[in-house]
Image (tube, helix red, strand yellow):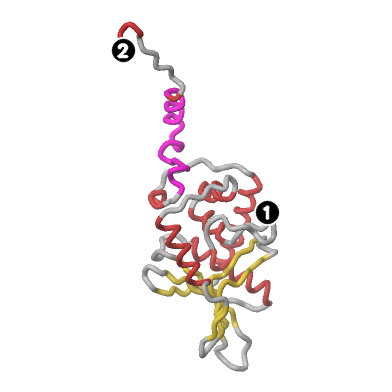
Amino acid sequence: MTGLEQSAEGDDYPPLSALNHLLFCERRCALLRIDRVWVDNVHTIGGTVAHHRAHEVSERSRSSHQVICGLRLVSRRLRLTGVADVVEFLRPNPDLRETPFPVEYKHGRRKRWDNDDVQLCAQAICLEEMLGVDVPAGAIYHVKSRGRRRVEFSTELRSKTERAAGRLHALLAAGRIPAPELKPRCRGCSIRGVCLPEIFSRPDRVEQLARGLFKANLSDPSTSTP
């Protein structure tokens, strides 16, 4: 899920995608969730298209297992809600219960950060809470590289997901936008033109521009030409 989708549980239940935004950049997350800023670029549009394709069919069957697209998720422990792109219900043995296997679609190739993995792990926690079964693993499908990457929901990743959810709720409850910090990842951010990290990360530059904004520029009438 991307964008400014509404929570099904009210303001206390932000979307799972907010975890992704938080770990990418807390300022971006706050601008999206608190100030409701959203600007599309080639990356966000590509991501939206990838999600729509994954949600085109609400339910499918394969020879080996059932696949459900667009499954709504909620966790009252994490206080998060969202929609899973795809959940495969695997049954490796006819005598065993089906095991949910969430698959999250991402437009680009794998990034250096683990924000995608945390978002997927949060989906697994939702499924475990909703269905009462263990969800040990899932996958990220990278549309650009057409590759599926398996993600194990380790104790470390689950702990990171829990901490990220706590940070998210604290950020939203504070209602303040964190100060900007210019980083290499700003290069592809869709709201860079609103965030303006090149300017607002330098207080001296902000003060200089503010003074110039209200500086009078009066001309001498005697030297003006008709």
Residue range in magenta is 191-212
Q: Secondary structure at mark 1?
A: loop
Residue in the picture at 44% in, 41% down = 197
Q: Give x and y (percent) for residue 27.
A: 52, 46
Question: In the image, is residue 79 above or below residue 130?
Answer: above
Q: Give x and y (percent) for residue 9.
A: 69, 60
Q: CA distance from mark 1 to mark 2?
A: 61 Å
Q: Amino acid at mark 1?
A: Asp
Image quarter (top left, top right, bottom left or bottom right) of the C terminus = top left
Residue in the picture at 55% in, 89% down = 92
Residue at which label 1 appears: 11
Q: Secondary structure at mark 2?
A: loop
Q: Amino acid at mark 2?
A: Pro
Residue at which label 2 appears: 226
Q: Give x and y (percent) for residue 88.
A: 55, 80
Question: In the image, is residue 191 above or below residue 151?
Answer: above
